[in-house]
Image (cartoon, grey):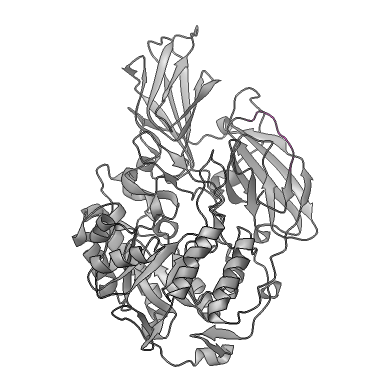
Amino acid sequence: MSLPRSFFTIVTGLMLGGCLFSGSLLAQRSQHTFALGQTDFLLDGKPFQLISGEMHPARIPRAYWQQRIRMAKAMGCNTIAAYVFWNYHESKPGVFDFKTDNRDIVEFIRLVQEEGLWVLLRPGPYVCAEWDFGGLPPYLLKTADVKVRCLDPTYMAAAERYIKKLAGLVKPLQISKGGPILMVQVENEYGSYANDRAYMQRIHQLWQDNGINVPFYTADGPAVANLAAGSLPGVAVGLDPGANQSNFDLATRTNPGVPIFSSESYPGWLTHWGEKWARPDTAGFLSEIRFLMDTKKSFNLYVIHGGTNFGFTAGANGFKPTEYQPDLTSYDYDAPINEQGQATPKYHALRRLIGQHVGALPDVPAPIPTMDIPEIKLDAFTTIWQNLPKPVRVAQPKPMEMFDQNEGFILYRTKIAGYQSGTLTLTEPHDYAMVYLDGKYIGHVYRDGGKWSIELPKTSNKEPVLDILVEGMGRINFAQYMIDRKGITDRVSLNSMTLMNWEVYNLPFDSRYIDQLKPTQQDADRPGHFFKGTFSLSSVADTYFDMSSYKKGVVYVNGHNLGRYWEIGPQKRLYCPATWLKKGQNEIVVFDLHQLSPSPINGVKTLE
């Protein structure tokens, strides 16, 4: 379901390059040029300050793209930066989707142009972005010895296929063709990862070979090692961030003769599960933006609007072999435009500051309507144990990627011959493993911290059945530990004896799996339950479903995966856009790893 265009305020005047155009005149606009000067970006031969706000179409309901773009414009932005998440568009090798749901990147760019703004395109192949695997497709991980972000043949064959496909779609949208794309980024923060300049040059050349002829830029942290490894001659330098003059001076010394800009200035920050909400200091950030505006330096706000990691798209961080920090479902990011698309106090402060330099700004668009939903009664529906697919038999556990599964859950089952009670060790559990013996829940093993063992009790059964249900919680998206397969990645041992002969059940928890669930008798004491409820609406608006009475799991509304919740917080509410609700009867399905009986839930208007 999508909302009609009349749902939003329609703006008839459109800004382009500082001039006011009507919609019909926009289609007849004159050709523009964009080039790299020695120190400045040059639009039509004149110095041009990029005032960019970043947002990601994959994280925003498609019906709201235009409203979010207009919010950025009303804050003073003349440009929108956008990541393209490779794995969101190619989940299987050679099978691309640039049309369904939030995937129509061409339409998003056209909407930006319709609003009279320019585009910085950030297509990767790697993007980071707190997105699963940094945007790289998980199918790469089926190759046991694959290396990423380098000239590894397996990786490069896939990257070349992606670049060719995406370039074919966006090359008509370049400024050289009358479109809004000013620049394209080569990779992302490469100097924070590796130093293969030949790889960076190859990625740069691939875009050019496939018809991308606008200027390019790189982006890295303002440190000598990062800039030396991640920049390219003749390519603009982005700083993540460029917060002061010394950052810019350093970049100029490292790569002279090209413009330098702050490619990621951070008004907010990310939050992991189990942390407090990130709330960066606004006063300090305003001081940064004042410096950039006063000195006419270009910048991009990362992010002006974060949106939502719907489904299983959230990534994770990990900076040590045993460290694992999964990201929240919400990507609110404490950004100027919050997860619902509303202006925050930070937004208004930035709007005032930018407006002092650029003059009058468009009115702030009306907020998207929100609503409370009265208490919804959920009932016990079925369990994961009564909805298992046909298993695959293997000698030892393998991660889900080896079974062509990208996300969700995976179950490993074996009978333990020669059973003795003692220490069960999972090497390695990626990421949250529930352990059962003869159907009795023993406990869970969580990846973070490296404590991967649990004690198994005595039993009269000489060959008890061991079940290990593993939730993949998002692949690491930054730094050195990105080869992050999900499930059990090596072996399971009991008192140092490796357990063999396993059945593996793939549980992607995609819409097809959820749709085929049938009501069954409950296994009351065995965690792994689905709960289901219905609710009726006379009208629709955005809401948050409050999951504070549940423990850990996933929520589906009318078949749409809202994402993960977890009682450790800080997020207890999941965003549901109006576009996923409907007048009349609606359905909600909750899968909880620990909860044994249903509790009612309700819809509320805010994230907190």
Residue at 47% in and 25% down = 467
Q: Is residue 6 above or below residue 600?
A: below
- Name the one closer to the observer, 433 or 232: 232
Q: Is residue 52 above or below residue 597?
A: below
Q: Position of residue 373 (x, y in %)?
A: 77, 51
- Name the one closer to the observer, 333 or 330: 333
Q: Quadrant of residue 596?
A: top right
Q: Quadrant of residue 362?
A: bottom right
Residue at 40% in and 66% down = 262
Asked whether residue 607 is in view, the answer is yes
Q: Position of residue 121 (x, y in %)?
A: 41, 70
Side of 75 where 232 appears, left or right: left
Task: Specify the segment rendered in magenta.
Answer: 595-601
Q: Quadrant of the N terminus?
A: bottom right
Residue at 27% in and 54% down = 155
Q: Is residue 347 above or below residue 433?
A: below
- Magenta stretch: dominant secondary structure: loop
Q: Quadrant of residue 205?
A: bottom left
Q: Is residue 437 above or below residue 568?
A: above
Residue 368 lies in the magenta stretch: no
Q: Position of residue 458 (x, y in %)?
A: 48, 8
Q: Disc count in the image?
A: 0
- Name the one closer to the observer, 197 or 411: 197
Side of 454 where 195 appears, left or right: left
Residue 598 lies in the magenta stretch: yes
